[in-house]
Amino acid sequence: MRLFEGMLIVVHILWLFTFLYRFDVKIKLITNFSAFILLIIHLELEGYRWQMGLSYILFILLTVLTMKALIQRNRKNVKSMVGNMKNKRKVKKYLYILFIIIYSISSFVLVTVMPVFQLPKPTGPFEVGMNSRHLKDESRQNSAQKVGELMIQIWYPADVEEDVKEIHYEPFPYEEWSGTIEFIFSTPRILFEYLKYGQTNSIKDVAVTNKQEKFPVLLFSHGYGSTRMQNFSQMEEMASHGYIVVSVDHSNDAAYTKFPDGREIINQKNPYSYSFNIADEKDVKTRSTDMSYVIDQLTTINDKDPLDLFTGKIDMNKIGIFGHSYGGSTAAQALLDDRRISAGINIDGPLHEPVASSGFDQPFMFILDENYLYIPDEEIQYTNITTEEFQKYHDKITELADYHYKEGIRGDTFMLTFIAGDHYSFTDFPYLSPLLSWNIDIDYFHEVMNKYILAFFDQYVKGEAPDPLLKKEIIEDQFYYFEANIKND
C-alpha cells in the first residue's frame, strides 16, 4: 500500500463516521476538503489504479452528500412523526456501519493484496545500467516472423557521477509482465497496468563503469511462456557484482514480446501445452541456438558497439549461463552445444535429450524446489497427459537430476534444494502479491539463491578463488539444504 492511498482510505472512513454520528456540517466540509487534497496528491504523485476505484466513487458520493447537508443546514424540521424518524435513523445507522465495514475491508485488502511493489536493492558495489537490443538474424526464420528476431535485455555495472543530485531509475516493465500474466493465468492485461508505478534499480543507457577494463558475461533464459524480465531483481543483483547480464526473449515461446517499432508478439499457444517428454528436444535446441546467436552478436557489439556503450567492455572469454524452468533446460543444452560457455546453472528445470543421455564437461549447479516440478492432480487435468504419465515423467526427471549431479556431468556439480516456496518462488512473480509468498520470506529466499549463484559464477566464470560456501558438503536448516560434488580438486 502506498502512503497517500492509505491516507485517503483512512480519511474516507472518518468521513463516513461524520455521517454516522451526524457531526456538524463544518466537520464534514473539513473532511471533504482534506479528502480532496489527498486525492489530488495521490493522483499526481502515485497515479490512479483500479484497486482504488471504490475510493474514487466514494469521494464523489460523499461530496454530494456533504453538499446536500450544507444546503439543508438552515432548514427547519417541521415533521412531527418523531417515532418514525427514530426508526429510520436507526436503520440508516446500521447501513452506515455495514458500509464502513465493507469499504474498510475491501479497500485495504485490494491495495494490500495487489500492491505497487519495489524490487529489493542490489547488494553489489556498482550501480546498475540497463539497455535493450533488437537482434535480427536473416538466416533464421519462424512462422511468426519473416526473419529470426530476438529482444534482449542487458544489465551491466555502471557508475553515476558524484555531482548527480537525483538518480532516475527505470519504471517496472509492466507490459512484459502483464502480457506474461495474461498468457499464464488468462487474466486481462489491463488489471496489471498499475505495475508501471513500480520502480526498478536500473538506469537506462548509463555508461559502463571504468573501474574495471572488462566484465564477464552471464546469459539468462526464461521459463516456458514467460519473459526475459521475469527475474529482473536477480539480473540487477548479478550486474551490481560486476557481470554483464543478458536475458533473452525466446521468440518461439515467450509469452509477450514488444519490439522497438511497436509490434507485439503474443503467444497463442496453450500455456499447458509444454511437452512432458525428455526426448522432445526440438524446442530446447532452438533456444540453445538463440543463446549461441546472442554470443555471436555480443562478440560483434564488443568489437564495435553502434551505440558506443559496450565496445571493449565485454570479456568474451568468460561466459556463464543460467535459466529458470525450461530456461534451465536451455542452459544445460547450451553447455553441450557451445564450448564458449564455461559453466551453467539450472533453476528448477528438467534435463532433456541429448543432455539427459550424454551430459557435458563444464561445472554445473542445480537449484531446485524440494517438490521438483511436481504438478498436483487438479492442474494435470489442464495438460495433455494423464496423472500416470506425469508421474512417470516426474520420476524420470528426478532420477536424471540425481544421476547427473553425482556422475553424469563431468565437471564439479552442486545441488541447492529449497524446502520452502514453489516453482515461481525462483522468479520475481511472488512480489506481485503477498498471497503468492505467504508461506516464505521471499527476500530471504532470493538472498540465499543469489548468494550461491554468485559464489558459483565467481569461481567458474570469473576465475576467482573458491568460495568456502561451495566447499561445505551439506548445509541444512528449515529453509534449504546444499550439497557439493567436487570432482576436479
Image: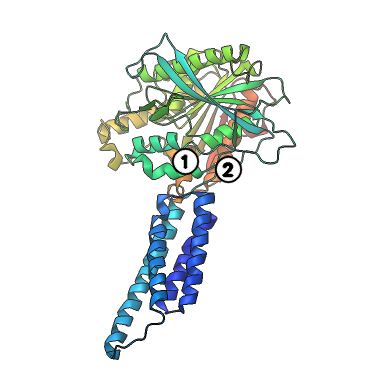
> From what the image shows, is residue 233 above or below residue 62?
above
| First-in-chain label (1 vs 2) | 2
- Quadrant of the image occupied by residue 184: top left
Q: CA distance from mark 1 to mark 2?
A: 15 Å
| Residue 199: percent from left, percent from top | 55, 42
Q: Which residue is mark 2?
A: 120
Q: Which mark is residue 425?
A: 1
Secondary structure state at the residue bearing disc 2: loop
| Residue 179: percent from left, percent from top | 39, 35
- Quadrant of the image occupied by residue 147: top left
How would you rate the neighbour count of disc 1 (Cα within 10 Å): few for under 14, some for 14-19, many for 20 or more?
many
Residue 448 in the figure: left or right of residue 390:
right
The one of 109 and 164 positioned closer to us in this rendering: 164
| Residue 85: percent from left, percent from top | 30, 85
Q: Tell me if I can see residue 1 in this picture.
A: no
How would you rate the neighbour count of disc 2 (Cα within 10 Å): few for under 14, some for 14-19, many for 20 or more?
some
Instruction: Locate the C terminus by quadrant.
Output: top right
